């Protein structure tokens, strides 16, 4: 029986955070003062978790963090993941989310190891603004080189994620539209969610889907194209067919009803929702000597507790027990 929760959602998508360290301190994510808060595990432990989970129906694995490329051995981890097969004997769809700072030199080895595609986070297409958001000087050129190297080695598609936050970068919408067309990447705007260390989120800090579309239309109209049910992004092409834009709108247009994801944190806890207020100690089970069958039973039980939906912006909203960088985005 494939993994599914009590609302009938099939769980096919796994995100594994391999560290909660990050070399960027993006203003919408981190305070700038906190470092890593949780430990990380030997790659062999994540690999065992991934193997058990693929046996239960996982088809996609995304390696994330913190910043996953900070972890020595991540390329070998991707190579080992690529040897796993889904319950139907197919190859896994392996992706990586990174800030791109170290990507240029690693793109070829990651591709050779079996990585299929990469998502690079980038919140401004202007070096100065980029430095102000990431609080790291001179990162922009590295990230751009990482994006270009990924395209060159055939990591496809290259997606560029941009979190828009009012007062910081909402005026970058058109610049990103041009960037998508010129660089041949899919740019995806993400609505800012209340998952930051600083707790600065309020509804008016969010630049919502409608506003993004309106701003982009001042440059060129977008035409919506079909997207998969469990895909997080609404997809658009420009009216001349060149350049793809996605908008991930968990705040203004929640998609929890189609959620197919679970996450494993760097310290081996399962999180069933970004907004969970607790986690489930999978690694604790391993430390106690659980067999693969016992881990599978534990995972099935945890998935039954997956939250129906998030409550962002509602009076009963309770902040998640971890912030994004410590969960794995
Ligand atoms: N370090 C990697 C990176 O920069 O992509 C992976 C981890 S990062 C936490 C994953 C993604 O989460 C990034 O695209 C980041 O922009 C996004 N993110 C972080 N905080 C967010 C928030 N409060 N709301 C929406 N997206 C957020």
Image (tube, rainbow, N blue to C red):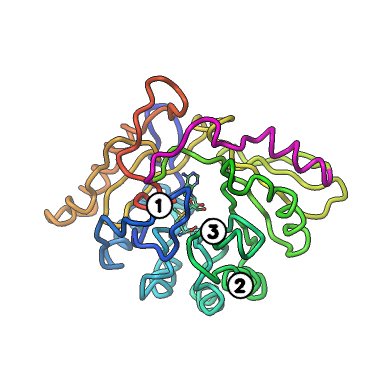
The answer to which of 279 and 144 lies nearer the viewer is 144
Name the residue carrying label 1.
30
> SS for tag 2?
helix
- Residue 219 magenta: yes
Q: Is residue 179 left or right of residue 208?
A: right
Going from the N terminus, do you reach mark 1 or mark 2 first? 1
Crowding around mark 2 (Cα neighbors within 10 Å: few <14, some 14 to 19, many 20+) is few
Name the residue carrying label 3.
132
Going from the N terminus, do you reach mark 3 or mark 2 first? 3
Question: Could you tell me how far apart the alpha carbons at marks 1 and 3 are, in whole angstroms?
Answer: 13 Å
> SS for tag 1?
loop
The answer to which of 234 and 58 lies nearer the viewer is 234
Q: Is residue 208 left or right of residue 8?
A: right
Q: Residue at x 59, y 68 (%)?
A: 140
Compared with residue 272, is residue 48 higher up or lower down, i.e. above or below? Answer: below
Crowding around mark 1 (Cα neighbors within 10 Å: few <14, some 14 to 19, many 20+) is many
Magenta-tinted stretch: 197-220
Q: Is residue 313 left or right of residue 183?
A: left
Name the residue carrying label 2.
141
- Residue 278 magenta: no
Q: Residue at x 47, y 40 (%)?
A: 260
Q: Residue at x 65, y 35 (%)?
A: 209
Going from the N terminus, do you reach mark 1 or mark 3 first? 1
**Most distant residue in the top direction:** 315
Count the marks: 3
The answer to which of 156 and 176 lies nearer the viewer is 176
The answer to which of 178 and 2 lies nearer the viewer is 178
Q: Is mark 3 within 8 Å of ligand 1?
A: no
Q: Nearer the viewer, mark 3 or mark 2?
A: 3
Q: Residue at x 55, y 31 (%)?
A: 204
């Amino acid at each position: 029986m494939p993994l599914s929760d009590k609302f009938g959602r099939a769980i096919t998508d796994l995100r594994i955070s391999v560290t909660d360290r990050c070399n960027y301190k993006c203003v919408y994510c981190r305070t700038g003062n906190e470092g890593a808060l949780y430990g990380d595990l030997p790659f062999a432990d994540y690999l065992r978790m991934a193997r058990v989970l693929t046996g239960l129906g996982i088809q996609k694995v995304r390696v994330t963090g913190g910043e996953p490329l900070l972890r020595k051995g991540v390329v070998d981890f991707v190579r080992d993941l690529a040897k796993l097969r889904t319950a139907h004997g197919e190859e896994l769809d392996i992706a990586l989310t990174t800030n791109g700072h170290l990507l240029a030199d690693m793109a070829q080895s990651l591709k050779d190891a079996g990585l299929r595609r990469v998502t690079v986070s980038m919140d401004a297409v202007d070096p100065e603004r980029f430095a102000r958001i990431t609080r790291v000087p001179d990162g922009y050129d590295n990230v751009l080189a990482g994006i270009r190297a990924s395209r060159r080695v055939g990591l496809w598609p290259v997606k560029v994620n941009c979190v828009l936050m009012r007062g910081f970068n909402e005026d970058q919408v058109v610049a990103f539209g041009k960037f998508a067309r010129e660089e041949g990447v899919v740019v995806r705007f993400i609505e800012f969610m209340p998952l930051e260390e600083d707790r600065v989120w309020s509804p008016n800090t969010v630049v919502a889907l409608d506003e993004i579309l309106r701003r982009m239309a001042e440059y060129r109209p977008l035409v919506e194209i079909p997207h998969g049910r469990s895909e997080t992004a609404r997809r658009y092409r420009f009216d001349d067919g060149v350049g793809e834009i996605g908008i991930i709108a968990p705040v203004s247009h929640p998609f929890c009803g189609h959620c197919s994801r679970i996450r494993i944190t760097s310290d081996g806890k399962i999180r069933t929702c970004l907004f969970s207020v607790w986690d489930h100690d999978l690694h604790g089970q391993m430390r106690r000597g659980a067999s693969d069958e016992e881990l599978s039973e534990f995972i099935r039980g945890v998935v039954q507790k997956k939250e129906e939906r998030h409550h962002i912006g509602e009076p009963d909203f309770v902040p998640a027990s971890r912030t994004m960088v410590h969960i794995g985005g």
